[in-house]
Amino acid sequence: MERELQEIGALKDAVLAEAARVIVGQQEAMESLLIAFLAQGHVLLEGVPGTAKTLMVRSLSAVLGLQFGRIQFTPDLMPSDIVGTHVFDLQSGSFRLTRGPIFTELLLADEINRAPAKAQSALLEAMQERQVSIDGQAHPLGEFFTVFATQNPVEHEGTYPLPEAQLDRFLLKVRVGYPSAEEEDAVLSRVSADASTSELGHTALKPILTKQHVAGVRVLASRVVVDDPVRRYVRDLMRATRTTPMVLLGAGPRAGVHLLVAARWAALLSGRGFVTPDDVQRMLHPVVCHRLVLAPEVELDGLGAEEVIDRVASGVDVPR
């Protein structure tokens, strides 16, 4: 297994290096996106406009050699605009299915919080079951179907808060911040070499992972060892979020499952065949923070979910 672990590490480095031809910085965010895709989970990307959220997903689809699709969420979006509908064909005299943009492999749900609950509900079945129902008939979306949803954390006019049931189906929430001074200088230097405003410019990314590679890697992940003390550590962290007075709604059992899965993939991509408490702590924020409902007095004190989960985790014994 040692040789296989080295190959996985080399593949991860190759994927990130190829994406870096287009994406400046954001290495941690790109690795989180890769972890979520390999773990068959979905990602909520949060950041202000212009921080390369869309470009990251497009680049990931290119280096994975997968089909990319996009839905721009708006207040008037209907479920049929997402999943499709049956249309009467005059030539054949029968109804035929016109598939919606959800029939893809990597789906960018842009500004997902701008759509009302009726449109949001169209995604719930797809995210959980990887299928959609149209007129009572189920249509599979495939094992590579992954949702990457974006939202702006600052602008709230004309937006709808995502329901807790939908938030709980996102494996990770990745915060995309501004680049450093050096990274922004690198972005501007690329613009000076290309007068186009196109995000991808003339750079063609080549596929690094094939679908056969992905299937093999997913089999290898099932062999990553999780010792009982680490498993109990995940359990204790989840239970601690339910007993603290700082949180109204703590992390549910699905959050614990997602944290353990994400930690296994973090260990695997780091070249290890076993999970450590450091892997759990590394994935704690992106897996758990978006699932917590904080107490009003905590929010009035200016504390966010990250600070709360850090305080909660500090009271849980770390296995040695």
Image (tube, helix red, strand yellow):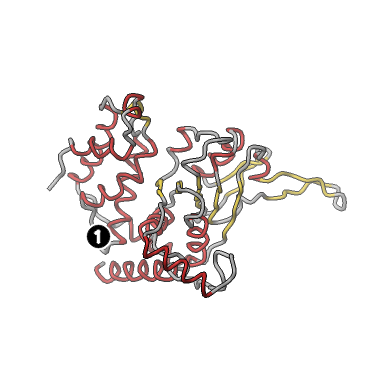
Three-letter amino acid code of the residue under disc 1: Gly
Residue in the image at 39% along x and 39% along y: 290
Q: How many marks?
A: 1
- Position above or below: 243 against 169: above
Image coordinates of residue 112 in percent, x first then y, are 55, 43
268 left or right, relative to 67: left
Residue in the image at 85% along x and 52% along y: 92
Image coordinates of residue 151 in percent, x first then y, are 50, 44
- Position above or below: 316 against 297: below
Which residue occupies the extreme left position in the image? 320
User: Dot 1 surroundings within 10 Å: few (below 14), some, or many (20 or more)?
Assistant: many
Residue in the image at 51% along x and 40% along y: 155
71 left or right, relative to 21: right
Element marked by disc 1? loop
* Observer-nearest of 283 and 274: 283
Image coordinates of residue 117 in percent, x first then y, are 58, 33
Q: To which residue does mark 1 refer?
A: 273
Query: Where does the N terminus fall, quadrant-wise?
Result: bottom left
- Position above or below: 299 against 212: above
